[in-house]
Every structure is written in structure tokens, then in C-alpha cells.
Amino acid sequence: MRRHTMTTLVLIALASLALTGCSHGASGPSPAAASSPRGESGPAGTEPLSSAALSKRLLTEKDLGESYVRKAEGTRHNDDVTVMGCPALAKLGGDADTGGSLAFPRKAKVAFTYGVGGTSEVSEELYSDTATKLSDGVGRIFDAMASCPKYQVVSGTTAIDMTTQTTTAPKLGEEQWSQLLTYSVGGQRSVVKRTAIRTGTVVVIVAGSPALVDAHLDKALAKAESR
């Protein structure tokens, strides 16, 4: 299995785990986030943006530079996703559809391959809601993942061995979350970085090859904050 195919598989599986997790209120602040006071609004504005408005703030090939190719949006699958060895993640919706994304109604997403043969990958997701709902929802997902350093995700007939390590996120926006996800499929091992930044009523999530995430996070946030 090629590396970028593995990356796609694990990101889709992880997105599906978040389907129900972001639709519930949280009981308190998220310890996984290095942040200003929870729910504080910022430069992105105080009113949630529409999905159409968010789509205009996504990165493009022109923003990223040469050797980036936008991926076609994937077809939704009906494979069940099962989490083994992590009750906190399983509770968030391990049986959700693998084509899903975080359960905020206002959202936009895009993915790119990079390099010869598209062997590296980076994706961006934008979500908008009230600052408090974004803070609670995204924090809940990152906290659940951090609670289980090792677990397994089974998507259809494919078993993915996962380890999660919380990392320091750059001091951007009002709240920040970041994790390194190491996964193994069919004897191959790879690492995905997933960093989320909340700025006002918008959350920016950049995921994929750690080097590509670090290279493009700033410009993704700047474009998300544009008016």
C-alpha cells in the first residue's frame, strides 16, 4: 500500500470518529489546548461563517506552490469503523461512516498531494460555529485521542495500529491543539501531524506530513482570517 493511500485511510478513519464527538457540549475546558480563556472571540469575527464563505478561505495550489496537486473529493464509504483499546474514542462514534468529518454544520475541506508520484499529502479543514462550541468540540476530540497512547482502528477489513503523542502547537489564534499520530498498516509505518487552531469563530485544522503541516499552517491561518 502506498504511503499517501495509507495517510488518506487513517485521516478518513479519524475524521469519522469525530462525527458525534463535536455535537455534544463539554463539561469543562480542554486540557489538551494551550490557549487564552476558553471561548474567547478573536480576529476572525464574532459571527459564524457559512460553508460557502469558508470554502473561499481554503488554501489553493497557487497558495502552496509548485508540485502540489489538489485531490478529488473522495467517495463516501459505508464501512464501519471500530475502535479497539480506547474507550474514550469509541464513545465518540467509532461506528460512524468513514466519509464523515467533524460535526459542525458550517465546514469546508481540501486535500493535496505533493512531490513526484504524490507520495506526501496535506489536508485542510475549516469549521465555523460559536467560539465556545468550537472550543468544546475540538478539545473533546483531541483529549479523547490523547487519553489512549496506543489503540487500533478497524475500517472495514483494514486494521490500523495507532499511537498518539501530544505535541506543542505554535502560539497562534486563541486556542491550539497538536498531535503526532503514528500508524501502521500492512507492515508499513508512517506519521501524520494534526494541528488545530481556533481564531474567533473559525477552526483551522491542517493534517498530513509533519513537514508540510509546519510549512503551511501559518498561511492557512492567515487566509482563514482574511475578510
Image (cartoon, rainbow, N blue to C red):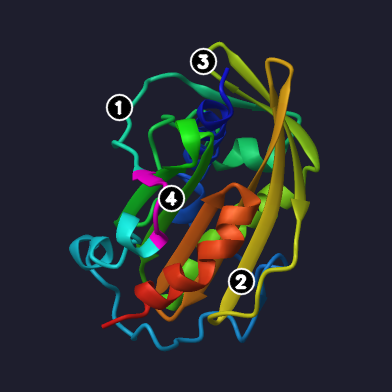
Figure quadrant of the C terminus: bottom left
Q: Amino acid at mark 3?
A: Gly
Of the pair 28 and 160, the residue shown nearer to us: 160
If you read the primary sequence from the N terminus, does the residue marked by circle 3 or circle 4 appear first? 4
Tell me if mark 4 has few (under 14), some (14-19) or many (20+) residues whose alpha carbon lies within 10 angstroms of its own.
many
Tell me if mark 3 has few (under 14), some (14-19) or many (20+) residues whose alpha carbon lies within 10 angstroms of its own.
few
Label 1 sits on residue: 75
Position of residue 46 relative to residue 182, above or below, is below
If you read the primary sequence from the N terminus, does the residue marked by circle 2 or circle 3 appear first? 3
The secondary element bearing badge 4 is classed as loop
- Separation of residues labelled 2 and 3 (CA atoms): 32 Å
Label 2 sits on residue: 176
- Separation of residues labelled 1 and 3 (CA atoms): 15 Å
Position of residue 224 relative to residue 161, above or below, is below
Q: Which mark is residue 156?
A: 3
The secondary element bearing badge 3 is classed as loop
Are the residues tagged 3 and 4 within 8 Å (C-beta)? no
